[in-house]
Every structure is written in structure tokens, then in C-alpha cells.
Image (cartoon, rainbow, N blue to C red):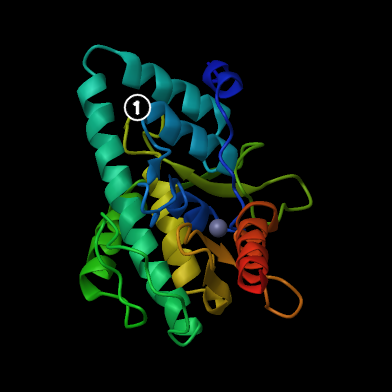
Amino acid sequence: MEWEGPMAKSVPFELIAGNVALNFANTLDNRCSPRGETELLRSYDDLLRVCAQSRVLSPRQLGRLHHTASLANGRAKAADALRSAIRLRETIERIFAAVARNQEGGNVSPLPRRCSHGQRPSAGPVNGKDLAILNGYVKEALAYRCIAPASAFARTSTMTSNGFAFGWQWREEGTDLNAPFWPLALAAAELLVSGDLGLVRECRSATCRWLFLDKSKNHSRLWCDMKTCGNRVKARRYYRKRSLKQ
Ligand SMILES: [Zn+2]
């Protein structure tokens, strides 16, 4: 049973961050807009969709989770899992926003208003409480991780000459509704200990604040996406200059 139907009907997530955990953090749009933020994870299926697009769970796993969540005794559990996933997302966002702000030496424009998910400092250490929350999720994820003969989907290590290969898989991945946030929590942990940590940046648009990995040649990427935030800010600057001249 593969889960395909709801994918076709929905607007895809904009996975521009270059990292699974940061893309997940970006599922709250317009995070600091005075007009209010836009929640992109409005249902358990939305959580499954972001996992599907990020390729962290297989279509077969997603199909089973979608089915389990739609059962009469699964709906309340799915709502709990969605709440937990959002708590994880906000923790990931706070941790990596702090990392990004420290990379930029605190040289960021001030927030236009207090974000509803908590005031963020301009630059400062990663909060120990947030690391403790993330570690709680990581502990749960690791308890479900196991080695198995590699399927076509699993990320594998090298294959032996006679065709043996093994990969990381998840136990009870099809029925435990918390399964979507196991790979997301581990992706955040892996980024924290990786050499890419120093490339984490926050979009310069004061209302957007999406996170991404700056893998540009000169490490000079400022915007989550030039077509949206970059152009918007440039246009605003142009009109401001023009109105000053008039
Ligand atoms: Zn942006």
C-alpha cells in the first residue's frame, strides 16, 4: 500500500534549504511577518507529505502511516504526533537560528515584532533546554533504529562483490505514528555534529527567516530563494530610493 493520492492534490513544500532538518524548520512560513505566520503543517497528512518529499520515509511506510492515522482509534494519536512534530520543528528552528545568528556575528536586521513562538535573541548560545528537548527526540529515534538487509529505498553502505548490502531502517515504522519525526530529529542531530554546521544561514528577509545551508561558491547566499525573498527586498529598496529622489 503506497500513499500517492493526497500528494497529487497538494501544493508541494518548497524544500530550498539543502538539508532535511532545515527544510522541516521552514514548514512555518512568514515566521516573523506582522501579518501573521502561515502554518504549513495543518494535518498529519501534511507531516507525511514533507517526509515524502524529503525522502526520509518510503512510499510504503507512508501508505501504512496514512492508513493507521485514518482509523477511528488513530486520529487522536495522529493529532498528538503532529503536536510533537511541531514541538520538534520549533526546537530545531530555535537551535539553528541561534547557530546562524552566531555565524553572522549578530549582524542581522532586528525582528519586526515578537514572534509568537518566542522572542529570539539577536545572537547568543544555543539554549541548553532546546538541546535537551532535541536529545529526547533523538533518544526515541535511536531506540527504533536497526540494521537490516538494504531495500531499494534505504540509504546503503557499500555492497559486497556478491551483492550483500545493509542499511538503516526503522522498527514499527508503519504503525507507530511518531515515525515521521524520527528521521527528522536524527537529521538535526547529524547536522549539529557535521562540518556543514558553519554554513547554516537565516534568510535576510525580516519577515521570512527561513533557514538554509549556504553552499554557494563564496558563501554569500543571503536569501532562502532569490525569486521570492531576494526580489522582494530588492524591489522594496528600489522603490524606497525612487521615492527619496522624488
Ligand atoms: Zn526568505
Question: Relative to the observer, which residue lies in front, 186 or 92?
Answer: 92
Can residue 26 be seen from the camera position used here? yes
Horizontal relation, residue 53 to residue 29: left or right = right
Secondary structure at numbered mark 1 = loop
Percent position of residue 200, x then y: 53, 71
Residue at 62% in and 49% down: 155
- In this view, the residue farthest toward the front is 246
Can you say whether 55 is above or below 97 in the image?
A: above
Whether residue 171 sits left or right of residue 82 in the image: it is right
Q: Residue at left 46%, top 78%?
A: 108
Q: Which percent across, then down, holds residue 84?
A: 26, 44
Name which residue type carries label 1. Thr
Q: What residue lies at 28% left-to-right and 69% top-to-bottom?
A: 131
Q: Nearer the viewer, residue 146 or 134?
A: 134
Q: Quadrant of ligand 1?
A: bottom right
Residue drawn at the location 49% of the way across and 83% of the way down: 103
Q: Which residue is mark 1?
A: 175
Q: Is residue 59 above or below residue 116?
A: above
Residue 93, image quadrant? bottom left
